Amino acid sequence: MSRYSRCIPFLLCLSPLTVNASENIEIEPLAASQPESAQQSSEKVKYFPAKWGVGIGMRRADIPYATEDDVVTDVMPLIEFENDYFFIDGLEAGAHIWKNDEHQVNLYTRFRFVDIPQEYQNETQSDAFDLGFQYRFQKGGLEADAAFLSDGNKRYYGYTRTQYHYTTGDWQLNPYAEFQWKSDGFNEHYYGLDLIDPGAGLAFSAGLNTRYHLASNLYLLANFGVTRLEDDIYNLPTIENQYQFDSFFGFGFYPDAKRPNSNPIPKESGEFLRVAHGWATPSNLNDILTGNAKGDRYNNQLTSLFYGIPLSDSLFTLPIDLYFTAGGVWHHDSEVQDNIAEGVIGVKAFYTLDLGWRFRIGVAEGLSYVSEVTYIEGSELDEKDYRPSKLLNYLDFSFDVNIGDVFNHAPLQNAWLGYSIHHRSGIFETSSAFGRIKGGSNYNTVYVQWHF
């Protein structure tokens, strides 16, 4: 029996995990001619953040296991944002428990890949965001981290990482080196496949993350890395390769390095709250956008609340407003499902058309995680013989009108009434992060959005 045929039954036993810009600066405007009392009474001015972004690309990684396939590929969306309270940086994120100019202690999550042949990824769904704590030191371009994490079944591991952020011309370069400590329970499950206990161990990774400024807000992304597994792991009959190479190529939209955005945020482009209510539809996006959507026979509904933080008032020098947005969604119970919670993060863009009344077209890209898979989503995937994934790609398409313009009432100039499509999907089986599924769910929603 080949090493490949011995390993596959146990690969299927890998359990899935269930989670899974510099800061906005407030500056007191001072004028030399103002008396002190006038300065103190001045309102604080908020400026657009300098650190934000959204991107997508293809990851390629060697498979360390003893299988016929040597390589696996993934499409991965990326989000970047940071403020005084939390940060999101591609495949990792944290909420600050404590911080000062050089030190941070964070509640932390990082995405962990389990690189196995693509055909088994929907069944195993072992790729996941793990949770833990992180300490970070930053000074100049130097950044040093230490973190302790666990998967969903209390298999512990940690890492120490040192990296340097360097900019020269249109290039941003980020070399790094990392040691990864893995507990015996972690190694037994993910490398011994719950049959062999190789004990705890220490692996080493190093690589280079790069970003090239192509034009305006458009950047090319390229990352390269290598991981060396410890000898005790390499000697397992389930493992074939001690060195695992991975790479990532893609593109993204980030602040224009040649046109730093230091403009104050106008009130009409300020933070927003959006309240929406929606109805499920079994129709796909194409049917919805062409006006051929069907209703859900069980009348499944959701209610959502989204909060938006302004990022920029232009993209490629066009008047496009960008926001980081996070939302909580409540899927109401029905005869075919219980109450279900959903969390969403993303980046949303608005383009305004002034036709006497102001209209806006909006689109958002992000991530969505549900506590349980909804009926409208699960029933579609059952028909296609997919195992559902709680984590999926999120899209939002919207169209709204300014309420103040409609009623010619100035106090409502920051209020908008609109329609949106709440969409979750697996990007056509291209990503192990989303369970290698094709399909998802759609809801037609109506909303009111208020900027302040």
Image (cartoon, rainbow, N blue to C red):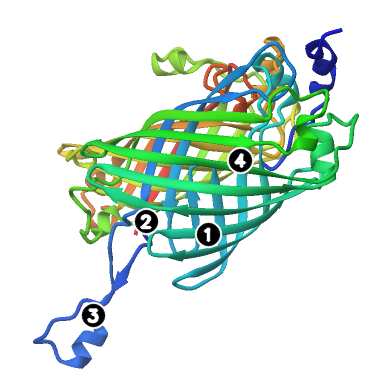
Identify the residue under disc 4: 111
Report the Cα–Cα distance between label 4 and label 3: 44 Å
Q: Quadrant of residue 271?
A: bottom left
* Foreground pick, 395 / 253: 253
Q: Hey, what amino acid is under mark 2?
A: Glu
Q: Residue 13 location, x and y as percent?
A: 83, 25
Q: Nearer the viewer, mark 1 or mark 4?
A: 1
Marks 1/4: CA–CA distance: 18 Å
Compared across the picture, whether 27 is left or right of 367 comes to left
Position of 26 relative to 12 (above/below): below
At 79% from the left and 22% from the top, the residue drawn is: 11
First in sequence: mark 2 or mark 4? 4
Amino acid beneath label 3:
Ser
Quarter residue 396 falls in: top left
Disc 2 or disc 4, which is closer to the eye? 4
Q: Nearer the viewer, mark 1 or mark 3?
A: 1
The kind of residue on which mark 1 rests is Ala
| Residue on which disc 2 sits | 271
Q: Is residue 444 visible?
A: no
Earlier residue among tags 2 and 1: 1
| SS for callout 4 | strand
What type is the residue that disc 4 sits on?
Answer: Phe
Residue for badge 3: 42
The structure residue drawn at horizontal position 28% and vertical position 62%, both measured from the top left corner, is 47
The residue singled out by tag 1 in the image is 144
Front residue of 36 and 268 = 36
